[in-house]
Amino acid sequence: MQNREESPEIKLIALDMDGTLLNEKGEVSDGNRKAIKEAIEAGIKVVLSTGRTRLTCRDHADSLKLDSYLVTINGGEIWGPDGSLVERNPVSAELISWMWDLSKEHKAGFWAVNSEKVFRDEMPEDLLSNEWLKFGFNIEDDAARETVLQTLAERGELEITNSALTNIEVNALGVNKANGIKRVCELLGLTMDQVMAVGDSLNDISMIRECGWGVAMGNAQETVKEAADAVTAANTEDGVAAAIRKFALKKQLS
């Protein structure tokens, strides 16, 4: 693990899930679980900040006994400690329809998230009457993916990231994990300077850059490592636990 300077006092830890908190089996390791418990006992809030929906992250939050907010769908939704919806940031149905057409044009796999469920490689007949939150492309071919990225960027109305090297994730412009964490900080009476964010992909880069201390996983995309204040171990090596203990709890690691 490396770091460029001393981390600030941390009051909130924002954790990405896939490729970060979760190991190769999609589970929270005992090591990460213990470090999160130590952080909570030290009075630090722990928030999951994920591209997943609430349905696919709530069980993990419950198992970790988290009593704070959830930032889901890359900031598309924010959920309160009591399970109530605090904020929802939709993508217009017209833009979703346009991206669906774009996926068909480039023969790309896709998924789309509305307020109720995740659609994979299919869409409902009443597409325009749904409340949409995110659209994603799965594109193995580098040239095709670059073409789609350029087309999306030229539209100028979208927040474009990824959660893996072969996919593209799209939210409404300005909807990202950093702004989700800012909203949580407002609700908790904290500042972004008091937050440590940990992640591995482009959908984590906004919070890694804008929080007081940004940590990239050892398995993170290189762009994410370059944006971070520090790099920890990989998600298969309890990298989250190491980051929590070194930068938030200020423990000396052997």
Image (cartoon, grey):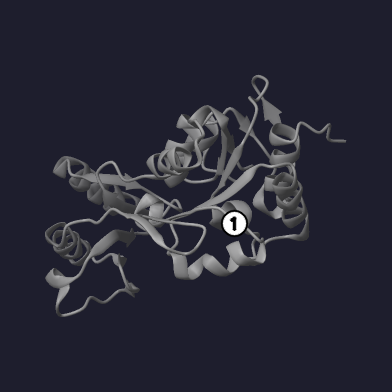
Q: Amino acid at mark 1?
A: Asp
Task: Kindly tell me whether residue 26 is visible in this rendering.
Answer: no
Residue 238: x, y in percent? 73, 50
Quadrant of image for the C terminus: top right
> Could you say which is closer to the camera, residue 200 or residue 132?
132
Q: Residue furthest bottom?
A: 125
Please give the residue where the numbered disc 1 appears in the rendered image: 67
Judge by depth and name the residue closer to the eye, 41 or 63: 41
Residue 11 visible in rendering = yes
The residue at 28%/64% (across/down) is 108
Q: Nearer the viewer, residue 148 or 206?
A: 206
Question: Hey, which quadrant is residue 39 in on the image?
Answer: top right
Disc 1 residue crowd, few under 14, some 14–19, many 20+, Cα 10 Å:
some
Tell me which corner region of the image, top left, top right, bottom left or bottom right, holds residue 228.
Answer: top right
Spot occupied by residue 247 in the image (x, y as percentages of width and height): 70, 32
| Residue 143 spot, x, y in % from top left | 29, 49
